[in-house]
Image (cartoon, rainbow, N blue to C red):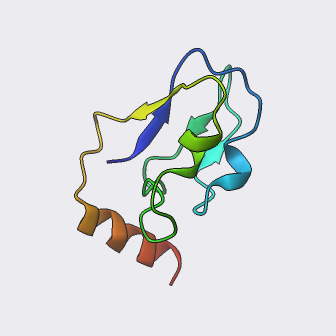
Amino acid sequence: MALMIVEPCTNCDACRPVCPNEAIAAGDPIYVIDALRCTECVGAEDEPQCRLVCPADCIVDNPDFRESREQLLAKYESLHA
């Protein structure tokens, strides 16, 4: 499942540089995660790095993108082929 950023995002930019898939970008008014690039760090890390560094605790599961661990790994591998 991909992640998404919700209010109360403070636009601190802590999440963007730790994303191994470059799925996070500045949006208007808050940061956004490209669900087609987000693998919850499967393939790169043991847990989502953006959630670890987010001081506002505003990164949640995206209900529109339900994917298994295997699907997330396949997505990661296709992004880094």
Which residue shows up at 60% across the image and 63% down it? 20
Which residue shows up at 24% across the image and 46% down it? 66
Q: Quadrant of residue 75?
A: bottom left
Image position, residue 21 (x, y; %)? 57, 62
Which residue shows up at 51% across the image and 46% down it? 34
Which residue shows up at 69% across the image and 46% down it? 16
Seen from the viewer's position, the closer of residues 56 and 72 is 56
User: Residue extending furthest right?
Assistant: 12
Seen from the viewer's position, the closer of residues 65 and 70 is 70
User: Residue extending furthest top?
Assistant: 8
Q: For the image shown, how many numbered marks are present on the structure?
A: 0
Image position, residue 47 (x, y; %)? 46, 54
Q: Is residue 56 left or right of residue 1?
A: right
Q: Is residue 67 above or below residue 77?
A: above
Q: Is residue 30 left or right of residue 73?
A: right
Image position, residue 11 (x, y; %)? 73, 26
Q: Is residue 73 left or right of residue 24?
A: left
Image position, residue 22 (x, y; %)? 63, 57
Q: Is residue 18 above or below residue 66?
A: below
